[in-house]
Image: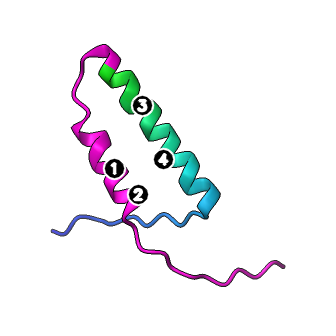
Amino acid sequence: MREKKNHLYVDSQERSIILLSLVELKNQLIQQGRYTDCVDELVFKVVNVPVKRMKIEYV
């Protein structure tokens, strides 16, 4: 069976907040002497995600 994929749509401000949070988490893990491989993968995915233009209609 295939894995279910989830899509997250964020704007540029939300994207920068996500990146800052991941960097802070990585710094905390480094201070604790733990591995940061999973956080590194997430940072890489967030930085390299393609931009998709969407039209938003307010009702």
- The answer to whether 58 is drawn above or below residue 28 in the figure is below
Distance from the alpha carbon under mark 3 to that under mark 1: 11 Å
Identify residue for label 4.
Answer: 19
Identify residue for label 3.
Answer: 25
- The answer to whether 21 is drawn above or below residue 29 in the figure is below
Name the residue rendered at 32%, 40% in the picture. 39
Rendered image quadrant of residue 54: bottom right
Label pair 3/4, CB-CB below 8 angstroms: no
Q: Position of residue 56 (x, y in %)?
A: 70, 80
Distance from the alpha carbon under mark 3 to that under mark 4: 10 Å
Label pair 4/2, CB-CB below 8 angstroms: yes
Q: Position of residue 30 (x, y in %)?
A: 31, 22
Q: Secondary structure at mark 2?
A: helix
**Disc 1 versus disc 4: nearer the observer:** 4
Name the residue rendered at 43%, 37% in the picture. 23
Name the residue rendered at 61%, 64% in the picture. 11
Label pair 3/1, CB-CB below 8 angstroms: no
- Which is nearer the N-term, disc 3 or disc 1? 3
Identify residue for label 2.
Answer: 46
